[in-house]
Image (cartoon, rainbow, N blue to C red):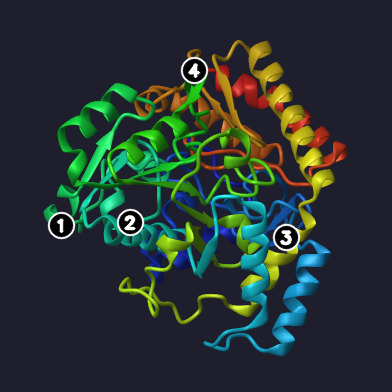
Amino acid sequence: MTPELPSTRSADLFARAQQVIPSGVNSPVRAFGSVGGTPPFLTDARGALLHDADGNEYVDLVGSWGPMILGHANEQVVEAVRAAAGRGLSFGAPQPGEVSLAEEVVARIGPVEQLRLVSSGTEATMSALRVARAATGRDVVVKFAGCYHGHVDALLAEAGSGVATFAMPGSAGVTAATARDTVVLPYGDRAAVSSLFAERGGEIAAIITEAAPANMGVITPPEEDGVGFNRFLSETVQAHGALLISDEVLTGFRASREGHYGIDGQGWAPDLMTFGKVIGGGLPVGAFGGRRDLMGLLAPAGPVYQAGTLSGNPLATAAGLATLQGLDESAYATLGSASRTLQQLVADALTTAGVPHVIQTAGTLFSVFFREQPVMTYADAKAQDTAAFTRFFHAMLEGGVYLPPSAFEAWFVSTAHTEPVLDRIAAALPAAAKAAAAA
């Protein structure tokens, strides 16, 4: 039996929520469906620490699924938002902050010559696909099993993350016509990519891929003969007149200063890129960008319509800009050190307890898979021991550490994960590792 939290306030809130919100949550993984139990309702956070409605304190390794890279309630970010709020919450018109944020992104990411802001990562990928189809005059999009690009109809097939958590191959409500224009291939399978383009290259508008998959757990893009998988995809689409969309919603500005592109982007470039999470510093924001000629297809200058009342919102752009400005060389050194230390702590505890596991990384991001063999595909990720993860998760929660409530997610550190914070995680790990080992 899955343990319940010892307090009742979160349980009461969850019961109330289930009466007025589908399943009691506004995003599926929050319901703890894959690990069981009652989700703690969080009330406040500072640095690397969370507090719930019952007064429990946790070390946070979710970080709002990525954006809290400087820690919760970072003073510079909060002050920037406070100042922006004092000038007005929303204008529905151009404002200086959106220019500054776009300039910061363009300065960091070489392939991005122009950027358009939206309000979510889903909007970003949806819009990038529309631009790609308009640019090529083609309909077919290629994605990889286990990669998640938001809840866009055409991209939900074998999408990983929340979909993997609930064992859903796709989603009800997606039309057959929409699904017909999406081809799903195994991640990393170059032969499958080459075969598809040899057969249908003239129909394909774009390949969309996570720069480093992080929604079926973190997978490092594989290399063959010194050529990384992303570069291979770029060269393939160029040879067939298609485009490459690199989804950096999770990895952007987190894996490194230039996202995952800064790690493996030598000698090639995606045509379009999508961003979210870190770029908003905790407020709702997304963005897509790329070559000037492609972005010039957007209305009002071009024929591709895309719009959003809250796009470029002054609070979101203030939070995002303050966050990016706080991510200097020292910050990335701190993130890298915290990530490596935590990986070693987890590996030592699981090894001591005899728990099969493998830890995989993409810059400062990492995942712990409960299996012995490396994970290279969605099928590999699904083959791990999710029951062991569930036991591990609840033991960590009881020990005061809040992990992603799914075996198919990345773990997130922040600059606030200092040595004393890591010591608290280390103290919880032995008992959690023993729980994972207990069949």
Q: Is residue 159 above or below residue 346?
A: below
Q: Circle 3: is it few (<14), some (14-19), or many (20+) Cα within 10 Å?
A: many
Rendered location of residue 423, percent (x, y): 83, 33
Q: Which secondary structure lies at badge 1? A: loop
Residue 416 visible within the image = no
Rendered location of residue 239, percent (x, y): 32, 37
Residue type highlighted by circle 3? Thr
Rendered location of residue 201, percent (x, y): 21, 39
Q: Circle 1: is it few (<14), some (14-19), or many (20+) Cα within 10 Å?
A: few
Would you name the residue on which mark 4 appears?
374
Nearest to the eye among marks 4 and 2: give it: 2
Rendered location of residue 376, percent (x, y): 43, 23
Q: Is residue 354 above or below residue 257?
A: above
Q: Which secondary structure lies at badge 3? A: helix
Residue type highlighted by circle 2? Ala
Residue type highlighted by circle 4? Pro
The answer to whether marks 4 and 2 mark residues whose Cβ atoms lie closer than 8 Å is no
Mark closer to the chain start, 3 or 2 = 2
Mark closer to the chain start, 1 or 4 = 1
Q: Distance between the residues labelled 3 and 4?
A: 33 Å
Q: Which secondary structure lies at badge 4? A: loop
Would you name the residue on which mark 2 appears?
132
Would you name the residue on which mark 3 appears?
323
Q: How far apart are marks 1 and 4 (CA)?
A: 35 Å
Kindly identify which numbered label has been placed on residue 175.
Answer: 1
Picture quarter containing residue 339? top right
Q: Looking at the image, which is closer to me, 239 or 7?
A: 239
Q: Is residue 317 above or below residue 337?
A: below
Q: Circle 2: is it few (<14), some (14-19), or many (20+) Cα within 10 Å?
A: many
In this rendering, position of residue 241 left or right of residue 274: left
